[in-house]
Amino acid sequence: MDYAIASQPYPEQNWGKSASYTKYNSANSERNLMNILQQMHSSLDPRTVFASYGKTLGQLLPIQGLQLNQQLKLNWGRCHGLNQQRVISGFGEPYSIKYYLTAPLTPSQTLQLNELESLFSQPFFNAIKFDQMSNKAMFDALTGLGNRYYYRQTIKNALARANRNQGDIALLVLDLDNFKSLNDKHGHKLGDTVLSEFAELINEAIRNTDQAFRIGGDEFIIIAQGNELEMTPLCQRIIAAMAEHPLMHAFNVQCSIGVTDSTVSNVQDKLYEAADKALYSAKAAGRNCFKMSNKNL
């Protein structure tokens, strides 16, 4: 099973606490298993499926916690003390789960765990694949940044928060100077490397509250908290980092930046137009610089 998802992986989380387990009753075990299966198939979020599995185990077996220790890291319950690691296979590549026990499993309980694992595998695999497809639909494959679709969803939500007086939103539009000439002279392979390195440079420059996107070609966008005047340090960091970056410096790659904020407009297309106009002012001023919106829409 491939756990490599285009953005960064989920952080470790605790999803509830284990309850005192109860023994299977043969008269209603089939109904219990059907209910368990329905619960796990009802979600396409891997974390929710994993939590549902953990809660089920906590009710039926002396299991107080479980832990998935791969690139997708998930915890449920109390992950300490006596434990047993098991490999689960059947859908995709095999993966391992560590079970934390309140008491050693009896042979019959081990058989019961085998049955529950078989019920867990398919909905968890389905959730992983759905999550991967969702990420591919929202993130740029080359740079790992959000794509145009994700940008439009994010700016819509950001402007809605700004309209509720929860703070200004700044929009930065970034464009690599003379990128077409670089591609024509040195080829698309180098061009793709420059785009990837530039995306990484942006991610290192922005704050945790900011988000970066590649919306096409060599055009990038940053949505940041604050007004346009507060974006001066960020713009300066990006331009300075370009000059210090070995690859950018070697091929004389620079960027121009246009900046505006939500005081200009609360309509996302108008906001983009203002930032784009500021970007062209930066290019007209000699490139390798940033300009603020003139707010004359």
Image (spheres, rainbow, N blue to C red):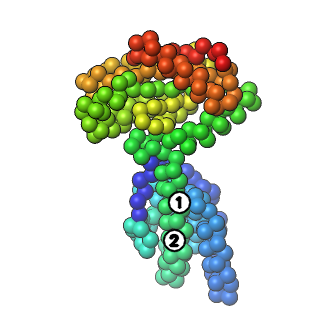
| Residue farthest toward the bottom in the current orientation of the protein | 27
Q: CA distance from mark 1 to mark 2?
A: 12 Å
Res. 21 in view: no
Q: Please rate how many residues cluster around mark 1, counting C-alpha atoms within 10 Å: few if below 14, some from 14 to 19, many from 20.
A: some
Q: Residue at x 55, y 68 (%)?
A: 123
Q: Residue at x 58, y 58 (%)?
A: 45
Res. 292 in view: yes
Which sits in the foreground, 196 or 190? 190
Q: Nearer the viewer, mark 1 or mark 2?
A: 1
Q: Position of residue 76 (x, y in %)?
A: 56, 58
Q: Quadrant of residue 226?
A: top right
Q: Amino acid at mark 1?
A: Phe
Q: Position of residue 232 (x, y in %)?
A: 51, 15
- Figure disc tally: 2
Residue 4 position (above or below residue 123): above
Q: Residue at x 42, y 68 (%)?
A: 92
Residue 93 position (above or below residue 284): below
Image quarter where the N terminus lies is: bottom left
Find residue 130 and name its label.
Answer: 1
Q: Which is more N-terminal, label 2 or label 1? A: 2
Q: Amino acid at mark 2?
A: Gln
Find residue 122 and name its label.
Answer: 2
